[in-house]
Amino acid sequence: MPNVPSTQPAIMKPTEEHPAYTQIAKEHALAQAELLKRQEEVERKAAELDRREREMQNLSQHGSIQRCLK
């Protein structure tokens, strides 16, 4: 019987250990929570700016009406 090469795959050992998948998932969840917190803060600030802009527009319109009535 001739010398036939093995059909088994070579098994390589990693040069460094990878972090546990649960640790990666935990870090991902923390990053996701931080992004959500920042998004909520941005939306809150945008709503406040919209409110202020409407107030200024209302004051401007009322001021124009007051001047016309005099």
Image (spheres, rainbow, N blue to C red):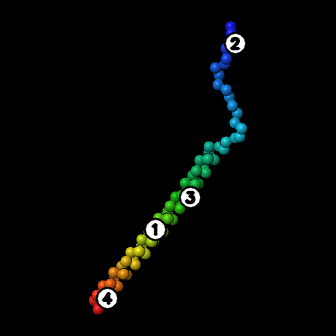
Three-letter amino acid code at the position of disc 1: Ala
Are there few (<14), some (14-19), or many (20+) residues within 10 Å of tag 2? few
Horizontal side, residue 13 vs residue 29: left or right:
right
Q: Which of 60 and 32 is in front in this view?
A: 60
* Image coordinates for residue 55, horizontal then vertical, percent: 39, 77
Distance, label 1 to label 2, CA atoms, is 75 Å
Q: Which of marks 4 and 1 is nearer the N terminus?
A: 1
Three-letter amino acid code at the position of disc 4: Arg
Q: Which of marks 4 and 3 is nearer the N terminus?
A: 3
Quarter assignment of residue 7: top right
Q: Residue beneath label 4, please? A: 67
The nearer-to-camera label among 3 and 1 is 1
* Image coordinates for residue 21, horizontal then vertical, percent: 62, 43
Three-letter amino acid code at the position of disc 2: Asn
Q: Residue beneath label 3, please? A: 34
State which quarter of the image contains the N terminus.
top right
* Image coordinates for residue 47, horizontal then vertical, percent: 44, 69
The nearer-to-camera label among 3 and 2 is 2
Q: Earlier in the sequence, mark 3 or mark 2?
A: 2
Q: Residue beneath label 2, please? A: 3
Q: Residue beneath label 1, please? A: 46
Report helix, strand or loop for mark 4. helix
Distance, label 3 to label 1, CA atoms, is 18 Å
Position above or below: 45 against 12: below
Quarter assignment of residue 66: bottom left
Report helix, strand or loop for mark 3. helix
Report helix, strand or loop for mark 2. loop
Position above or below: 38 against 22: below
Name the residue at 56% across, 58% down. 34
The nearer-to-camera label among 4 and 3 is 4
Quarter assignment of residue 9: top right
